[in-house]
Amino acid sequence: MVTAFIPDPDAATQEESTISGASGIAADDNGTIYAADVAPHMLRKYIKVN
Amino acid sequence: MTGALSMAIVRAQRDPAAVHIENVKNNLYVITGGRGTGVQANTISGNTTVFVTDNGVVLVDTKLPGFGQAILDQVRSVTTKPVTMVINTHTHNDHTGGNPELPRTIEYIAHENTRTNMARMDLFKGNNAALLPKRTFKDKMSLLAGKDRIDLYYFGAGHTNGDAIIVFPALRVAALGDLFARKWAPLVDAGNGGSATAFPDTLANAVAGIKDVDTVITGHSTTPIGRSGTFTPFNPAAKWSDLQEYAGFTREFVSAARVALAAGKTVDEAVSGLKLPDKYRSYDMTNAKADVQRVYEESRRAQSNPNALPNPYRLVEGWPTLPVSMNEGKWGELIRVDLDPKGNIWVFHRCFNTVPAGAATCIGRDREPPILQFDPSGKLLASFGQGIFAFPHGFTVDHDENVWATDANGNETVLGMSTEGRGQQVFKFSPTGEVLMTVGTRGVAGNGPDSFDQPTGVAVAANGDVFVTDGHGKNDRVVKFSKDGRFVKAWGKHGAGPGEFDQPHDIALDSKGRLFIADRSNSRVQIFDHWRQARYLHWERDHGHGDSVHSRS
């Protein structure tokens, strides 16, 4: 069951770009999430805040 | 000691439903009690907070209809100053009912959603529409100044979608309204935008976002004894630690309900099987079944609308630090990220290139290293892989910190340049970048034991077995190799049925040995049981492209 959702940072332009935003994902034991974005050209780190 | 005991006896003997004012701190009071009539005869009003400022009295909430004058009388017992301002924590009439009975000169303030909700109430129709809050806020607002300053916060849906938290910074006191009515399974008013699943996040955000408060005025000063119409008193001036505990209770309650839902239990089974830590044993659970039902409904609805799900994550701005010496510090396309056993972060990217869009090539950019390692702070630790890849794609770091990467190139040229025979291979690197092994035939597409058609993903089991999704071409299969690169088996074919694939795009293993395969053009994740059997287990549809999967193994 999906319990949380980080919106696609490229969602606003995805219809036009036809390629996905977040393409790679990893998580550590603390729940920190790392995302590799193809279209937005970004590497992102998300910290769980609660 | 005797005095404290006497006060306790007085409190215990007083009818908890009777209207009564008591001091909380200095110039701050709370008016408790106020039993309703008619259909609300079993309802006791919410607490009214009384803040005596230099220029007048500020009230937080005004009880059920009929208690306006009683509130004014209680205020008059502690000050001769007029009531000048009312803040309503939320829309319910046990917190707003007295508004129309107070002097018409009073200014009303509430969260913007509460104003919208109040406007739907019969209580604020006709002439009383003029009493709707004219000042509203969205996230935070401050009123007055100095020792009289009042901060209003909104942290999200819970009891309703407009629950304001009122903080009196000089006194270190916060009024929570019915976000913390009492210690109980919370009442959630979905009709006014309340949310059972958001409740824990909202309270957690409040606990984290409000500083320097030690006393919490709860929404109510009574706890109903079941549905008997009788009540026990509940201290309206709780501690900050009580709020922290309550936030934890809602978190564990919702989590337990979600586990029950995932296990296929009915609402009744979930409620009867609810096991929470012993520290919550005194909590009133009258609303437990309704709350579990609400969790079920919200969770099911959220599966078809991910945007409605909570996002308990915060983006770390400015992470990582890409050296200026690398493409002037600007990224191109990134395809994969993974962590090594030490917690460092490895990235596989397309040599800072951005073309062709979505399939950027490393051809012509042989000085750029496509494999980078960062520490958790974002500092670059290592880089390698120059001049090897045409189309970086699959990537993983194994248990021995070796780095595995696939080249999914299947073209002889890209952007008018020769791909120099690169592609169709899986590489194993040491942590320092030495090529230890290759699998697949360089530049040759095929479906044999040592060839791929654009390999997209790679996963390595704890025993060293290697799994490759194959891939972007026509093979639509998963291939298994031993740790020394010998072909073991392959399974799958083109299709949409169980065990069939349409562009298997990535692969991950969990600690149980289950394989998770992102089946891209089928928009699903397929799960296979133990890798020795490769037996199809399950699939989950509606995962968008199904581009990537990751599991902590």
Image (tube, coloured by chain):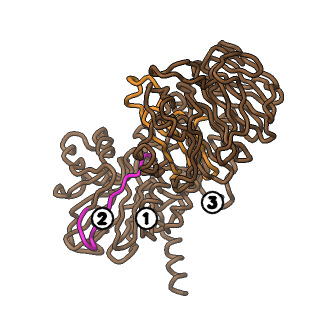
- Distance from the alpha carbon under mark 3 to that under mark 1: 19 Å
Q: Is residue B156 magenta?
A: yes
Outermost residue, left side: B105
The residues colored magenta run B143-157
Instruction: Chain letter for mark 1, please.
Output: B
Secondary structure category for the residue under label 2:
strand
Q: Residues within 10 Å of mark 2 (few under 14, many from 20)?
A: many
Quarter containing the C terminus of chain B: top right
Q: Residues within 10 Å of mark 3 (few under 14, many from 20)?
A: few
- Distance from the alpha carbon under mark 2 to that under mark 1: 14 Å
User: Residue B24: which disc?
Assistant: none
Q: Is residue A9 left or right of residue B301?
A: left
Q: Which residue is mark 1?
A: B217
User: Residue B282: which disc?
Assistant: 3
Q: Is residue B162 left or right of residue B102?
A: right
* Chain letter corresponding to the colour orange: A
Q: Is residue B327 left or right of residue B384?
A: left
Q: Which residue is mark 2?
A: B150
Q: Nearer the viewer, residue B253 or B26?
A: B253
Q: Amino acid at mark 3?
A: Ser
Residue B373 at least partly seen? yes
